[in-house]
Image (spheres, rainbow, N blue to C red):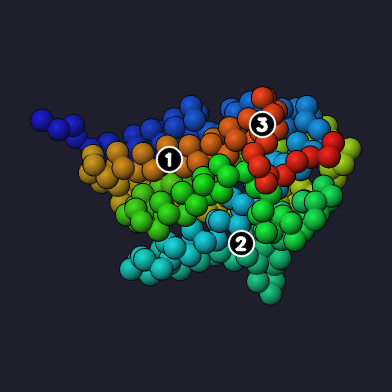
């Protein structure tokens, strides 16, 4: 006999528990970053590799828009693309991220080319795009729910970067400042969508697995950074090599 479905509140508790256990704020690389224990070159490596993920976000959102028949979902979700790509009224999150890499002394064309990114970074980002393009809409939306946990890490990052690195100033943390407002807005809709549409035990299990998958995408990127630039420090051929 199968178990009864969770109530929406029970499902939300389970979703939040995934973040408490698996979100990448617990990764050792982030602790080093926020604690001021990385060199300029290591921070450059993080920002350059994270750009790959930032650039993938509007592509995965466009993939969801292209396949859903739900007008209300499309109407709400398209704002996420504008948030990252920008429009006539706002430069967008990708431009704010490039302002960070500019300020860290990285050549913009090199960052945008993604030539120096770690192979694992590119694989992880593309796995996320494919997941959203191929999995059921409910799972695609559920995978975005790492934003439940994002404001706390953004606030910690802003404080840590400004306090611990003389080469970081307020102008360079603009991306994170903006996400403090955008992420809660986005997650309010996505969480409501999952609570409403994940009705059967099978759908609920799939939503939970989707969120676990997304935490693995984020964690894998930090694993690669730590392996290449911290310990044991094995940078793969063709990847960015810090000068300091």
Q: Quadrant of residue 157?
A: top right
Q: Can you give x and y, in whole percent of width and height, for residue 202 in the image?
A: 23, 42
Q: Nearer the viewer, mark 1 or mark 2?
A: 1
Tag of residue 155: none
Asked if residue 35 lies left or right of residue 117, the reply is right
Q: Can you give x and y, in whole percent of width and height, for residue 79 in the image?
A: 54, 65
Q: Report the Cα–Cα distance between label 1 and label 2.
A: 23 Å
Residue placed at 59% from the left, 66% from the top?
82
Label 3 belongs to which residue?
234
Q: Is residue 95 above or below residue 31?
A: below
Label 2 belongs to which residue?
83
Check disc 2 and report its element: helix, strand or loop. Answer: helix
Residue 72 visible:
no
Check disc 3 and report its element: helix, strand or loop. Answer: loop
Residue 144 visible:
yes
Q: Quadrant of residue 236?
A: top right
Q: Nearer the viewer, mark 2 or mark 3?
A: 3
> Of marks 1 and 3, which one's residue comes earlier in the chain?
1
Q: Report the Cα–Cα distance between label 1 and label 3.
A: 26 Å
Q: Which quarter of the image is occupied by the C terminus?
A: top right
Q: Nearer the viewer, mark 1 or mark 3?
A: 3
Answer yes or no: do the residues labelled 1 and 2 have beta carbons within 8 Å? no
> Of marks 1 and 2, which one's residue comes earlier in the chain?
2
Q: Can you give x and y, in whole percent of width and height, for residue 117 in the image?
A: 65, 47
Q: Can you give x and y, in whole percent of width and height, for residue 3 in the image?
A: 18, 32
Tag of residue 213: 1
């Amino acid at each position: 006999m199968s178990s009864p479905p969770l109530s929406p509140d029970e499902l939300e508790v389970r979703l939040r528990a995934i973040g408490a256990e698996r979100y990448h704020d617990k990764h050792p690389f982030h602790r080093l970053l926020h604690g001021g224990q990385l060199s300029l070159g290591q921070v450059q490596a993080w920002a350059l590799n994270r750009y790959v993920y930032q650039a993938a976000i509007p592509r995965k959102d466009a993939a969801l828009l292209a396949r859903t028949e739900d007008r209300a979902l499309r109407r709400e979700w398209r704002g996420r693309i504008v948030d990252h790509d920008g429009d006539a009224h706002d430069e967008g999150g990708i431009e704010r991220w490039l302002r960070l890499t500019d300020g860290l002394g990285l050549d913009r064309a090199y960052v945008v080319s993604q030539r120096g990114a770690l192979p694992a970074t590119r694989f992880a980002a593309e796995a996320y795009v494919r997941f959203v393009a191929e999995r059921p809409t409910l799972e695609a939306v559920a995978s975005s729910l790492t934003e439940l946990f994002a404001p706390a890490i953004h606030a910690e990052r802003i404080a840590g970067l400004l306090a611990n690195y003389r080469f970081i100033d307020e102008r360079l943390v603009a991306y994170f400042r903006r996400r403090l407002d955008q992420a809660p807005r986005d997650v309010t809709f996505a969480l409501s969508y999952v609570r409403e549409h994940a009705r059967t035990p099978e759908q609920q299990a799939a939503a939970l697995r989707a969120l676990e998958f997304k935490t693995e995408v984020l964690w894998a990127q930090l694993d690669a950074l730590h392996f290449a630039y911290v310990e044991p420090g094995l940078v793969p051929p063709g990847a960015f090599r810090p000068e300091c």
